[in-house]
Each structure stands twice: as C-alpha cells, then as structure tokens.
Image: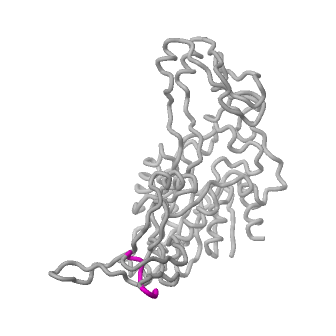
C-alpha cells in the first residue's frame, strides 16, 4: 500500500494527473463558514475544482464529500454543476457537540451596561477564568473562582423578556453528499469496462449477533429441537447499510426513546397461501432477527484526543491561541462559540478531524473489487487517507495546501503504517 500527500492547490496538483486516473473520491472540503477564522474555510470549493476532480476520475467513480449543515446546499450544487450525478446523502449523527449559541438575555444586559446578579454556580470549567458568556456584569470574562462559571439573573426588563432564548441549535449531525461520475453506458457495461460504478453493500452490512434463539412461532428461523428456532451466524448477512450513521451518544438517545425491540427477520412474499393470500416464510441466509434499540445501524464516535494526536508526539501541544488563530487569553480563546476547547493542548491542531472509524467505513463503501487509487482532496490532517488504507485501498493520493497540516498528515500516516 502507498500513501502520498501532495502539497499545493487542488486544481494545480490535479493538472499533472491524466484523465480517468482515480477510482473514487473521499474528502472533507471547506464548509464555507470561516470556521475559527481559518482562511481556508472562506468558501465551499468551486465548480471548476469539482470539474477537475471529475476529469481525473473514471466513469462511474463515486464521490463522498462532507459539508456543514448551513452550507450543504451550496457545496452540492457546485458538485452537480461540475457534471457529477447526485445519488444520495449520508448523515453522520453524533451525541456530542457544543451549542455555539448567543444567550440573547445576557447580550441585552451587556448592551445596556447592566450588571447581572449571580444566582449560583452553574458548572465547572477546566480552570482559570469564567467564560465570557457566563460571567456576570457586562459579559466580559472576570476572575471569579477558578474553574467555575455561574448562573445569573436578568437585570433589565428586556433581558427578562428574552430569557431562555438563543441563536443556534446544538450541532448533532454532518451530511455527506454521495455523487457519481456519469456512467459509460449501463451500470453493467461501466463496471465491466472501468471496474467502478457500484457500492460495496455486503462489505458494509451491519453485523448482527452470532446467534439468536426463540420458540416456534416467533419468526426467528429454523433448526432447533422441540420447536426451538435458532439462527446460525453463517445464515445472517447483516442489515443493508443505511444512509444514517450514528455514534454511541446519538444511538443511546434514540434507544432510550424506543426501548428494546425484536426484529422478526426478513421475509419474502413469493409463496401463496390459502385463498390466494400471501404466506410469509423465513428465508435462510436473509434473517436479521435480533433484539435491541432502534439505533442498530452503525456506530462511530467522534475522534478522541489520543486518536487525533497519534503519530504527532514530536510536536508541541498547542495553546488556545494557536488552536483558534487568536491571541492567547483573548475572548475568542475562551468562548465555545469561537471554537474554544476544540484543539487547545492538542498536537494535531486541525479543527475538524473526522474519526478514523467513520473514514474507514466510508472508504470501504466505495471500494471496488479490484481497487486502484482513491483521491483525497483537502486531505487536512490525513484522517480520510488513513481510513482508506485501513479499508484496503492500495494507493491513496491526498492533496493539502496548508504546510502544517501536510506535516501532521504525514506523521499520522507514518504512525498508522508502523
């Protein structure tokens, strides 16, 4: 297996590659949100860029690209305008995430110069000073008890009227667009000629338990003595991969609402019963009978600090200012709305690192039977590249224009290959 991180602009780098060089594309491009003040996130990629990516891909090649919830439409339209066929969207849902919302009541008091009364300790931070949005007074951070932040009462009539109002919801999902370069004829003709054009469904099925037992009449299969029905693991293919992916936190929230439920299995309707009615009988090899919550799709947690930093041990931990691109101890380094706490103290300072399990799963979904090379534009700190190698891609080419991220990606790739 080989992994190459090209340094430079995506369009300029791809100009050196011939037509039809890649089997697939997996990437996490800029969302166009100016996230944490980063210059590279000023806009979603252009139509011209996606047209160049299209050129270097084989007919039928799939493309998976993540976007933010507010700019997904802009990113997808540009991909479509470049000539790609939009096939679906995949939603990655996670239970973690911090609401980057402005407290309107506090903002009104701050604008009026009114001091808010401290009513109690609302929680505890990692230490130091209270967050500017949680400090009493005019909204500026003050040196109260180290590591604690406070609940406060509205001081003005306007603040009381708008108490409990904010400006944003808690982020809990990120969408991926699934696109495909137009086929060369039919699907069958395309896969025969170009070796790409389909998704690896069986490789991405969600596994069930090794065996399930039950009594006759419960729809759990055949084979047990005295009417007991047992499903052997060899008979279970697993569930068809869905376009929703959950992490453990999101799965737990869903299961708490639905409770445990039993799947009766997958039944064909090809047998005719009495009076012409359909007789449903289990078909061996296609049974998904198990029990559990409604979240039984695919789990993938957010990237941990250890996972982000693996291979980067030689780099110094970042300060809050280095992580956010602001002055240390400024308001932006303390406010969660500005990205505080995301990467402070980390060695891998890329602010939007995707988990390796998610990247591996998505790379496997677009892996053809005889894979060649996969393209990872906007390689960032290398998560998609590592995921592609883990999924079995023999050749991975990433492109990243930020020299620091190139260095981090190369260090993480070296660690993953060791």
Magenta residues, start to end: 218-226
Q: Which color scheme did the rendering employ for the protein?
A: one colour
Residue situated furthest front in the rendering: 226
Who's the residue at 43% across and 67% down the image? Answer: 262
Who's the residue at 53% across and 43% down the image? Answer: 171
Relative vertical location of residue 367 with respect to residue 158 in this rendering, above or below: below
Query: Residue 319 is drawn in which quadrant?
Result: top right
Q: Is residue 179 visible?
A: no
Q: Dividing the image into 4 quarters, which one contains the C terminus?
A: bottom right
**Frontmost residue, 330 versus 93:** 93
**Residue 407 % position (x, y):** 75, 56
**Residue 91 % position (x, y):** 48, 55
**Frontmost residue, 37 versus 113:** 113
> Looking at the magenta stretch, what is its main secondary structure?
loop
409 relative position to 65: left or right: right
**Residue 396 % position (x, y):** 64, 69
């Amino acid at each position: 297996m080989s992994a190459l991180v090209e340094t430079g602009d995506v369009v300029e780098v791809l100009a050196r590659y011939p037509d039809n060089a890649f089997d697939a594309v997996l990437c996490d491009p800029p969302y166009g949100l100016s996230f944490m003040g980063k210059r590279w996130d000023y806009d979603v990629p252009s139509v011209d860029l996606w047209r160049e990516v299209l050129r270097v891909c084989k007919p039928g090649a799939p493309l998976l690209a993540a976007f933010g919830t507010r700019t997904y439409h802009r990113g997808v339209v540009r991909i479509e305008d470049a000539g790609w066929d939009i096939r679906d969207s995949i939603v990655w849902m996670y239970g973690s995430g911090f609401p980057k919302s402005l407290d309107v009541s506090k903002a009104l008091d701050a604008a009026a110069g009114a001091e808010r009364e401290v009513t109690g300790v609302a929680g505890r931070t990692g230490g130091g000073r209270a967050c500017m949005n949680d400090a009493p007074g005019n909204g500026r951070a003050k040196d109260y008890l180290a590591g604690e932040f406070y609940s406060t009462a509205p001081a003005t009539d306007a603040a009381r009227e708008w108490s409990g109002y904010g400006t944003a919801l808690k982020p809990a999902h990120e969408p991926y667009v699934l696109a495909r370069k137009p086929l060369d004829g039919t699907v069958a003709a395309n896969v025969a000629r170009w070796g790409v054009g389909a998704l690896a469904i069986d490789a991405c099925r969600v596994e069930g338990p090794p065996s399930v037992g039950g009594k006759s009449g419960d729809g759990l299969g055949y084979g047990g003595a005295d009417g007991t029905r047992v499903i052997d693991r060899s008979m279970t293919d697993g569930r068809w991969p869905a376009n929703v992916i959950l992490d453990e936190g999101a799965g737990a929230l869903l299961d708490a609402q639905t409770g445990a439920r039993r799947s009766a299995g997958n039944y064909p309707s090809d047998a005719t019963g009495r009076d012409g009615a359909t007789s449903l009988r289990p078909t061996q090899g296609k049974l998904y009978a198990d029990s559990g919550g409604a979240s039984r799709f695919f789990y993938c947690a957010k990237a941990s600090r250890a996972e982000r930093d693996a291979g980067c041990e030689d780099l110094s931990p970042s300060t809050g200012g280095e992580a956010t691109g602001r002055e240390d101890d400024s308001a932006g380094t303390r406010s969660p709305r500005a990205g505080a706490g995301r990467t402070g103290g980390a060695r891998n300072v890329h602010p939007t690192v995707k988990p390796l399990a998610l990247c591996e799963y998505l790379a496997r979904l677009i892996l053809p039977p005889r894979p060649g090379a996969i393209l990872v534009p906007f390689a960032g700190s290398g998560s998609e590249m590592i995921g592609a190698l883990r999924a079995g891609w023999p050749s991975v080419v990433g492109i990243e224009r930020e020299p620091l991220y190139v260095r981090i990606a190369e260090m993480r790739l070296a660690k993953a290959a060791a």
